[in-house]
Image (spheres, helix red, strand yellow):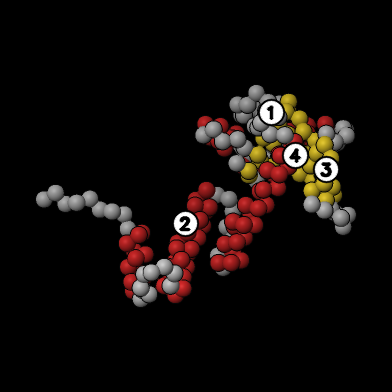
Amino acid sequence: MVGDGEFATAPFLHTADELGLPVVARLQGNLPELLAAAQKRFRSQPPKLSFRYRQDRVEMWDADDFDPWETLRWSTVRVFFYRQHKPNGQVVEAFWLTNLSPSKAGTRFLFQLAKSRWEIENQGFNDAKNRYAMAHICHHHPNSMLTGWLLLALGLTIERLYRVRYLHRGDHPVRTAIELLRILWFHLAAPSAADPS
């Protein structure tokens, strides 16, 4: 799982552990001691790895021996930091934490996982906003996210029914609007148990 800094909390990380899901989460100000320790160590060392990423030059630092915070039940925390130099002179820096061991995920792979967070943002939330005119989810509360994705799924289902009706793919007859509505209600309804009386 790749997540924002808001997900770098002990309860979330423990739940992910219980489900067997490795986590890569942004390390920000909500964990000030860990962030300060990583900044102090990495800014005083040369990068562990340097490579090209598209047009950019990337430097990376990585260590798996940071102390967990008080409520986290991990023996150690792996922290990595990248500095991404863009051709226009802009520099992007980010700290991340993970429970992936170096034997399971190399430093460069962690960079790719961290960058995938923006793919999720751009291809998920922003796609819903820009292609389907749905407002961006206002915050990352679980109920807001669930409601937003359920509404998106409903919108996509209605759009699919429209396309089936008007694009006429397959060998089915062109359906009327009321037939599409009945199909939608049929598929949304839960099957009821037979009345034994």
Which residue does the numbered mark 2 point to in the structure image? Answer: 150
Q: Which amino acid does label 1 sit on?
A: Ser
Which residue does the numbered mark 1 point to in the structure image? Answer: 103
The residue sitting at 76% across, 30% down in the picture is 63
Q: Is residue 139 in view from this perspective?
A: yes
- Quadrant in the rendering for residue 38: top right
Which residue does the numbered mark 3 point to in the structure image? Answer: 51
Vertical position of residue 156 compared to residue 47: above or below: below
Pick whichever, 62 or 11, lies toward us: 62
Q: Where is residue 91 in the image (x, y as percent from the top left)?
A: 84, 50
Which residue does the numbered mark 4 point to in the structure image? Answer: 108
* Extreme-top residue of the structure: 75
* Extreme-front residue of the structure: 171
Q: Element type at marker 2?
A: helix
Vertical position of residue 34 compared to residue 182: above or below: above
- Quadrant in the rendering for residue 47: top right
> Mark 1 or mark 4, which is nearer the start of the sequence?
1
Disc 3 from disc 4: Cα separation: 9 Å
